[in-house]
């Protein structure tokens, strides 16, 4: 099949560095396995196109229409997809490392096991996208909309998720160590068994979140709202909980050793058998908190005195 400008459109065609933007490419065109390295496809209409296993590295898809396109296992490294329309596109196992996808439209997109390492997804719309097992390490998701998306077992280590909308998203068993989730909306989020060690959760909204068995060692939760959250058996060793709201939180068997709880609000929090060894509770509100069986050795109490066994001594 030929098109204007003399380009042959067929599987495994060599279209490297071709200029195809604004071309009348037929929908459902088959370019499976084609070489489109560095091609200019900005504003192109490729809805339902077959691009599986195509080499699209460094290609320009800015403002292109790729709704329902088949991009499975495609090579999209360093591609530019700014404001591209990829609703319901199939990008399963695609390689998108270092691609630019700012403001991309990815509602209902299939990205399971895709490699999105270091991808720029700033302000992208990923509502109800499937990112199961995807690699998003170091990705920039600032201001992105990930509501109702599936991030189960996704690798989000060191990803930037500032001001990201994760309402209704599935993130259980995801890897979020070192991720920046400051100001993130995580209301009622199921984060059980998730690795959030060393993550930045400053001022995050995490009311009624499920965080049982979650790894939060050395995480920064200062100013976060964890009212009613379930942190039972979670690991918060060395975490920064300064000014954190933990009212009515459940922290049964939770490890809070060496945690900084300065000025934290623990009103009526449940802490039976919690480990608070060496924790700093200076200025914290522990009124009505249940500390039955809690380990308090070496903890600095709200009045600034050290709790040593069952005796308070001056700090």
Image: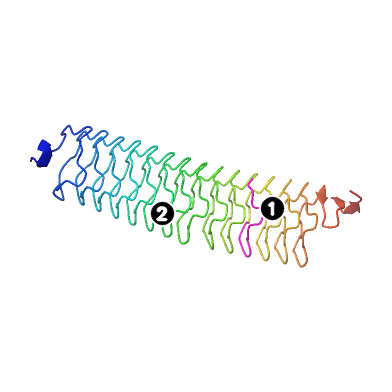
Q: Which residues are magenta?
A: 219-231
Residue 228 part of the magenta-drawn span: yes
Residue drawn at 43 percent across, 59 percent down: 147
* Residue 197 falls in image quadrant: top right
Secondary structure of the residue carrying tag 2 is loop
Residue drawn at 46 percent across, 45 percent down: 140
The reply, left or right, for residue 195 in relation to residue 49 is right
| Inter-mark Cα distance, 1 to 2 | 28 Å
- Magenta residues, dominant SS class: loop
- Front one among 49 and 214: 49
Quadrant housing the N terminus: top left
Q: Residue furthest left?
A: 1
Secondary structure of the residue carrying tag 1 is loop
Q: Quick one: label 2, few (<14), some, or many (20+) residues within 10 Å?
A: many
**Residue 149 appears in the figure:** yes
**Image location (x, y in percent) of residue 61:** 28, 44
| Circle 1 residue | 241
**Residue 8 appears in the figure:** no
* Residue 145 falls in image quadrant: bottom left
In the image, residue 209 above or below residue 177: below
The reply, left or right, for residue 233 in relation to residue 9 is right
**Image location (x, y in percent) of residue 114:** 36, 42
| Circle 2 residue | 150
* Residue 108 falls in image quadrant: bottom left
**Image location (x, y in percent) of residue 123:** 43, 53
Q: Residue furthest right?
A: 314
Q: Earlier in the sequence, mark 1 or mark 2?
A: 2
């Amino acid at each position: 099949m030929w098109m204007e400008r003399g380009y042959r459109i067929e599987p495994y065609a060599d279209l490297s560095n071709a200029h195809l933007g604004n071309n009348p490419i037929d929908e459902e065109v088959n370019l499976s396995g084609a070489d489109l390295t560095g091609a200019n496809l900005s504003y192109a209409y490729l809805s339902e196109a077959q691009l599986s296993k195509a080499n699209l590295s460094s290609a320009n898809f800015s403002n292109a229409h790729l709704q329902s396109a088949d991009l499975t296992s495609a090579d999209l490294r360093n591609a530019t997809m700014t404001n591209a329309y990829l609703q319901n596109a199939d990008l399963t196992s695609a390689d998108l490392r270092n691609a630019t996808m700012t403001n991309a439209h990815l509602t209902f997109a299939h990205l399971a096991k895709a490699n999105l390492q270091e991808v720029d997804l700033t302000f992208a719309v990923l509502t109800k996208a499937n990112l199961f097992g995807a690699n998003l390490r170091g990705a920039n998701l600032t201001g992105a909309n990930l509501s109702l998306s599936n991030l189960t077992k996704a690798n989000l280590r060191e990803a930037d998720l500032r001001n990201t909308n994760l309402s209704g998203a599935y993130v259980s068993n995801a890897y979020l160590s070192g991720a920046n989730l400051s100001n993130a909306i995580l209301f009622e989020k199921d984060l059980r068994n998730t690795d959030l060690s060393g993550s930045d959760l400053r001022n995050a909204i995490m009311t009624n979140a499920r965080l049982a068995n979650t790894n939060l060692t050395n995480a920064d939760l200062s100013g976060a709202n964890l009212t009613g959250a379930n942190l039972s058996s979670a690991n918060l060793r060395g975490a920064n909980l300064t000014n954190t709201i933990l009212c009515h939180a459940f922290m049964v068997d939770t490890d809070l050793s060496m945690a900084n709880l300065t000025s934290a609000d623990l009103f009526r929090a449940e802490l039976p058998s919690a480990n608070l060894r060496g924790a700093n509770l200076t200025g914290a509100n522990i009124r009505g908190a249940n500390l039955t069986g809690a380990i308090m050795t070496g903890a600095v109490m709200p009045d600034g005195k050290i709790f040593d066994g069952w005796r308070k001594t001056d700090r």
